[in-house]
Image: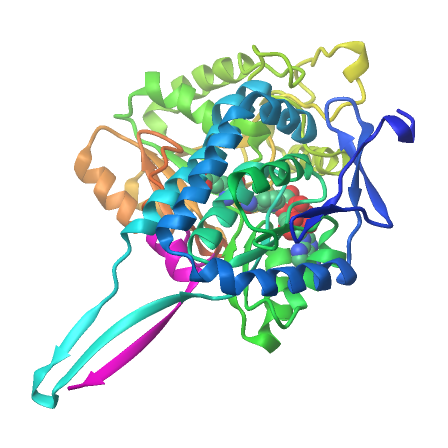
Amino acid sequence: MAGTKALLTLENFINGKFVPCNSYIDSYDPSTGDVYCRVPNSGKEEIDAAVEAARAAFPGWSARSPQERSQVLHRLADLLEQSLEELAQAESRDQGKTITLARTMDIPRSVQNFRFFASSILHHTSECTQMDHMGCLHYTVRAPVGIAGLISPWNLPLYLLTWKVAPAIAAGNTVIAKPSELTSVTAWMMCKLLERAGVPPGVVNIVFGTGPRVGEALVSHPEVPLISFTGSQPTAERITQLSAPHCKKLSLELGGKNPAIIFEDANLEECIPTTVKSSFANQGEICLCTSRIFVQKSIYSEFLEKFVEATRMWKVGIPSDPSASMGALISKAHLEKVRSYIKKAQMEGAQILCGEGVDTLHLPHRNQAGYFMLPTVITDIKDESCCMKEEIFGPVTCVVPFDSEEEVIQRANSVKYGLAATVWSSNVGRIHRVAKKLQSGLVWTNCWLIRELNLPFGGMKSSGVGREGAKDSYEFFTEIKTITIKH
Ligand SMILES: NC(=O)C1=CN([C@@H]2O[C@H](COP(=O)(O)OP(=O)(O)OC[C@H]3O[C@@H](n4cnc5c(N)ncnc54)[C@H](O)[C@@H]3O)[C@@H](O)[C@H]2O)C=CC1
Ligand SMILES: N/C(=C\C=C\C(=O)O)C(=O)O
């Protein structure tokens, strides 16, 4: 382990200044298992200071025109883009994802989040209705809510943090963000760019630390009327409990147990590589990843053989290897949790076709203690198995056969989650029918993770409450008022 002096030490960012903390948490490099960074272990005191800064900054920031705020967001996007390589290297080291994914997805999308909301904020209109027989005109106005509390997870650190910060400040709120304690580095790097982008002190405050300590202090603060959260369902429950006495506005973007439904008329040449990607991208650590693959019986054997062959080509490597498709999982505890699901499946009599326990993973000597595992395909598994019901959030996917359209819809819907589904078929009528009946906030047909940021993003059932996207985020981050004028 490196000595304390060599460790990267982060600081909170409050009222436009970096502020040290009196206690720190160790943060690990997932590719080696070594501590390489110290993250502030903040609590109520730091939240109180951030609330004071955000409160003081609110009148000035909210009074600016959307055009002025938009320019600031554009400048921040430009600065992030200029630092793309540095941010990608940091994200890959901190999270364990491949440098290629950080370069081509995480950081470009973070830049796009600011550009997108810088533009969309200029195009909202409000409603007006006439009531001539009463001599009245009614119209609506929107205003920013105030101080927004933003809590983000470790899987897509800067990508999901900026997906919340950008719409919140574009709409005129000030924010207090709490990134995951496991992946705080790129948020801290972004703070270094805020002043140059023209973000006034107190508009964006970032307070680091654990969920139970600083996260709960943020959620419980009476002057933070709104919480936007992405993460697990148990944490969402806790946030809901803490928010209830204050009637806070909540946006909860949670997990999934996402089905891929593959009909016999699917184009397997496109379907197989995309389904490998949808199962294992970012080590399977994306809430949208596929983890239940239903394949129509007539093509089941062919699919399985080709899918396992393609999975074996999905190279696990050290995150800095540009040829790697998959890096390390986020933590030792998470790796153990993911492995425990595979063990449970084996005990239930399922077959592991490739990956964990079947194939050998070769790693350089210095990465032997890293949190790596091979992408794993499970079959001969019952729909009732925990591997088919619970979110594993790792590189594990189950493949099972089905007979009919009606049957597969019922089985796909038979879990508590309802976030994202993919449907593969060349029959347009069938695609429409199935997509409509799936209990899922998002349905991708013959593709995966093609995002249109204008349209609603979010899940049904235990996958969340509320939607994010141009109009939805604007509505969430503003309060609406109806005004009646009698003339
Ligand atoms: N987007 C998603 O769907 C995600 C799902 N997960 C799921 O959750 C599982 C556990 O991962 P975790 O990192 O523990 O997720 P988590 O839900 O505990 O963490 C997400 C964020 O919430 C914060 N948090 C935790 N407890 C809190 C509390 N009591 N009050 C306020 N904030 C709190 C964390 O510090 C982090 O910033 C994963 O294995 C995965 O299944 C995890 C991350 C993202
Ligand atoms: N919320 C998550 C992914 C979102 C992706 C997107 O907005 O494109 C997640 O994995 O938690």
Magenta residues (range): 465-487
| Magenta-colored stretch includes residue 236 | no
Q: For this rendering, which residue is in front, 309 or 183?
A: 183
The answer, for residue 375, to whether it is visible in the render is no
Quick check: 355 left or right of 413? right
Percent of width and height locating residue 458 = 43, 50
Q: For this rendering, which residue is in front, 210 or 485?
A: 485
What residue sits 73% from the left and 34% below the top?
A: 331
What residue sits 40% from the left and 20% below the top?
A: 272
Name the image quarter holding residue 117: top left
Quick check: 112 left or right of 227? left
Quick check: 231 left or right of 77? right
What residue sits 22% from the left and 39% below the top?
A: 430
**Image color mode:** rainbow
In this rendering, the answer to whether 17 lies above or below 51 is above
Quadrant for the C terminus in the image: bottom left
What residue sits 57% from the left and 12% below the top?
A: 322
Percent of width and height locating residue 196 = 56, 38
| Magenta-colored stretch includes residue 481 | yes
Percent of width and height locating residue 166 = 47, 47
Q: Residue furthest left?
A: 133
Quadrant for the N terminus in the image: top right
The answer, for residue 43, to whether it is visible in the render is yes
Q: Residue furthest right?
A: 3
Name the image quarter holding residue 156: top right
Percent of width and height locating residue 141 = 31, 69
In this rendering, the answer to whether 280 lies above or below 456 is above
